[in-house]
Amino acid sequence: MDLDHFKEINDTLGHDMGDELLKETANRLLACVRKSDTVARMGGDEFTVILTETTIPENAEHVAKNILATLLQPFELNGTRCNVGCSIGIAIYPKHGKDSETLLKNADTAMYQAKVTRNTYRFYDDL
């Protein structure tokens, strides 16, 4: 997943506020998943969420909807209210890849499809 409008926060409020936004985003993401799942910042404003022990698309869709709703809530950064959203790409093992590299690549492809409309999620589609 990738934050929408993060660059504007960095450009208008500064990198310190951008860093605070990233920390708060990580906390919100952790609240959307189980303890057995993984949340990782890949760089910039891009995060990866790995849901363990699930191959059911509806489970991933449920988490994606929770993440979208959570990140659409305003952020309070040192007294300044900020709004961002996110674009989420979903790849399911083993349907969309049997190794981590392929799954990440396919999730990234789906994320860029989601970025066309923003604040949404897309499943990888190899058609």
Image (tube, rainbow, N blue to C red):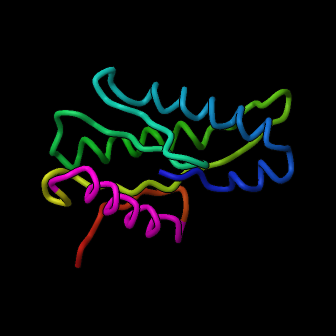
Snapshot quadrant of residue 62: top left
Residue 100 in magenta stretch:
yes
Residue sitting farthest toward the top: 35
Above or below, 50 relative to 102: above
Above or below, 107 relative to 82: below
Q: Main secondary structure of the magenta part?
A: helix
| Residue in the image at 26% along x and 70% along y | 125
- Magenta residues, as a range? 98-117
Above or below, 46 relative to 50: below
Snapshot quadrant of residue 7: bottom right
Q: Is residue 53 left or right of residue 14?
A: left
| Residue in the image at 57% along x and 40% along y | 71
- Name the image quarter holding the C terminus: bottom left
x then y, percent, for residue 87: 50, 56
Q: Is residue 72 left or right of residue 69?
A: right
| Residue in the image at 13% along x and 53% along y | 94
Q: Is residue 31 left or right of residue 36?
A: right
Above or below, 18 relative to 35: below
Query: Which of 60 and 47 lies nearest the eye of the viewer?
Result: 47
x then y, percent, for residue 49: 38, 40
x then y, percent, for residue 8: 77, 55
Residue 76 in magenta stretch:
no
